[in-house]
Image (cartoon, rainbow, N blue to C red):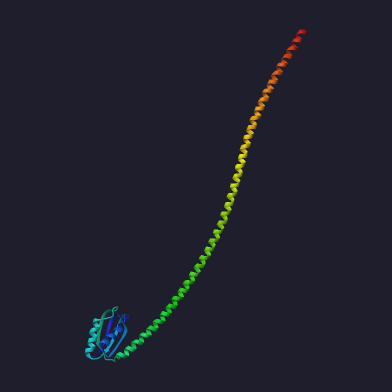
């Protein structure tokens, strides 16, 4: 008996062909072939099987009940087949070669992807280096700015110190001025006292002089009167 079986659904990249080969091995099917196809945009596995009728039927019954864990089967079609079917041992070698080819292809793609990833990493590292260099430049500028600020603060401290010295000198000058004013006031009071004493002395002297003059005038008048 020869049969062609189409398994449709999510059946690629889930180990379906290896699963079917193991199933055929368990039923000791002599001739077996399985290949991945795309039918009307859907994933499919084409299975060809040839052996005694009971083995083929048992294989198909088991195939309808079992599947790989990751597979999602939508439909299974079974039909007669008139073509040649590969021996199971030959298919095993064929599948092994196909798997090795896939591994080599995937390996090459993985190496290519790794190279691309490494290249991207190198670019990222270069960008990081550039960013770090810019950060270093910014830090240097910040250090320079801080140094200038320190210098300005030192100058401000010096100016404040000079201002303090000037204020101290002003305080000293004001103290001297206050002392001078006090001395002037004392001297002025002393001068006032002296002037007042002089005035009093002058008044006393003038009063005495006037009295004396008046007496002399009176004597002169008396003499003149006696002469008349």
Q: Residue at x 23, y 89 (%)?
A: 55
Asked if residue 10 is positioned above or below residue 127 in the image, the reply reads below
Residue 43: give x, y in percent of width and height: 31, 81
Residue 152: give x, y in percent of width and height: 57, 55
Q: Residue at x 62, y 38 (%)?
A: 177
Q: Nearer the viewer, residue 63 or 200?
A: 200
Could you tell me if residue 40 is visible in this image? no
Rendered-image quadrant of the C terminus: top right
Q: Nearer the viewer, residue 153 or 109?
A: 153
- Which residue extends farthest right? 227
Q: Residue at x 43, y 79 (%)?
A: 112
Residue 26: give x, y in percent of width and height: 26, 86
Asked if residue 218 is positioned above or below residue 37 in the image, the reply reads above
- Total marks in image: 0
Could you tell me if residue 129 is visible in this image? yes
Left or right, 53 with reference to 140:
left
């Amino acid at each position: 008996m020869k049969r062609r079986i189409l398994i449709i659904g999510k059946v690629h990249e889930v180990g379906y062909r290896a699963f079917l080969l193991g199933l055929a091995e368990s039923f000791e099917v002599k001739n077996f072939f399985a290949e991945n196809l795309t039918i009307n945009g859907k994933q499919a596995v084409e299975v060809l099987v040839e052996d005694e009728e009971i083995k083929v039927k048992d294989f198909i019954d088991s195939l309808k009940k079992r599947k790989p864990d990751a597979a999602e089967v939508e439909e299974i079609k079974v039909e007669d087949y008139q073509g040649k079917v590969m021996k199971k041992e030959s298919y095993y070698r064929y599948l092994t070669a196909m798997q090795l080819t896939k591994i080599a292809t995937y390996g090459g793609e993985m190496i290519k992807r790794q190279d691309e990833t490494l290249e991207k990493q190198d670019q990222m590292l270069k960008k990081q280096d550039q960013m770090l260099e810019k950060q270093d430049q910014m830090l240097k500028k910040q250090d320079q700015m801080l140094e200038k600020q320190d210098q300005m603060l030192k100058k401000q401290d010096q100016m404040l110190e000079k201002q303090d010295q000037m204020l101290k000198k002003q305080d000293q000058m004001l103290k001297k001025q206050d002392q001078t004013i006090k001395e002037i006031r004392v001297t002025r009071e002393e001068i006032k006292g002296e002037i007042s004493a002089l005035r009093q002395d002058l008044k006393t002297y003038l009063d005495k002089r006037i009295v004396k003059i008046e007496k002399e005038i009176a004597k002169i008048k008396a003499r003149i009167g006696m002469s008349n």
